[in-house]
Image (cartoon, rainbow, N blue to C red):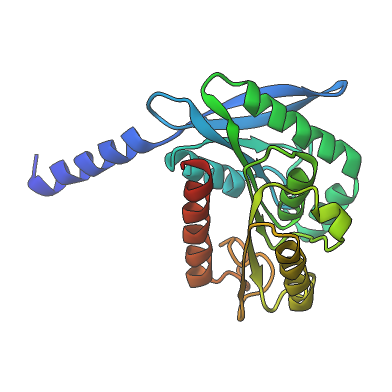
Amino acid sequence: MTKAIFLLFTVMFAISALAANGKSVSYKSGDETVQATLYTPTGKGPFPGIIVIHEWWGLNDWVKEQASKLADQGYAALAVDLYRGKVATTPEEAHEIMRGVPEDRAKRDLHAAFEFLKSQENVKPDRIASIGWCMGGGYSLDVALQEPTLSAAVINYGHLATDANSLKQINAAVLGNFGGQDRGIPVEDVKKFEQALRDLGKQADIKIYPDAGHAFENPNNKTGYRPEDAADAWQRTVNFLASKLKK
């Protein structure tokens, strides 16, 4: 075996040793059963937990990859399926499926996901966060609004709320990553959201990437992907979660 091949196998083994374990799980949400994929780090827990919420495409490979990467950072990451097994491949299909999901059902599913994570022996029940992108970013905020013991919420270009009476319910620290060219979530709305949180004394770390549009973190967004901004947003996320869940 040449030295180059030996080194290659060594690197592959190291990556394999760090890779998170993913398994299909299910949990009850009212009278329904929700499917999800739970990624857990190698080693002995308990670990902080994260609810991972998909974009309007559904629980596809990219979202599962993000959950796996979070598990590699030391978190039990539960990638929930709000679409009951459906995954869109076109914007038209994604829009249709998303419109077909009752908002109250989605919020119920996410509350059940929170309770499911808390019940796991290898999860720290007082160290749970939420993260989402696009549609999932908005739902990550909703988790913060409805779960008073949530530790942290990461919102990647998701819908916002500015009503003080609603935002008063948030106890979680909030991290937000938004695109300055996002036509669906104007910069003015992002700034109002940040100011409203600060006026209430909430922990908020919001960043607007001036040249980025919607979904700039996803490489499948061929025309809108911004690799440098995406890398920065990911590093911000890693640092934020570590400061709130591993302290």
Whether residue 160 is situated above or below residue 51 in the rendered picture = below
Q: Which is more toward the observer, 20 or 127?
A: 127
Q: Which is more toward the observer, 38 or 113?
A: 113
Q: Which is more toward the observer, 192 or 234?
A: 192
- Residue 170 in the image: state x and y as whole percent: 75, 49
The residue under the point 69% across, 23% down is 26
Identify the residue at the far left of this view. 2
- Residue 77 in the image: state x and y as whole percent: 56, 36
Q: Quadrant of residue 133?
A: bottom right
The residue under the point 66% across, 64% down is 215
Whether residue 110 is situated above or below residue 33 in the rendered picture = below
Instruction: Work out whether residue 101 can be spotted.
Output: no
- Residue 62 in the image: state x and y as whole percent: 58, 49
Q: Which is more toward the observer, 189 or 35?
A: 189
Quarter holding the N terminus is top left
Whether residue 180 is situated above or below residue 225 in the rendered picture = below
Instruction: Work out whether residue 63 can be spotted.
Output: yes
Q: Quadrant of residue 162?
A: bottom right
The residue under the point 82% across, 39% down is 107
Horizontal side of residue 110 vs 52, given as left or right: right
Counting the numbered discs, the total is 0
Horizontal side of residue 13 vs 192, given as left or right: left
The residue under the point 40% across, 36% down is 19
- Residue 240 in the image: state x and y as whole percent: 52, 54
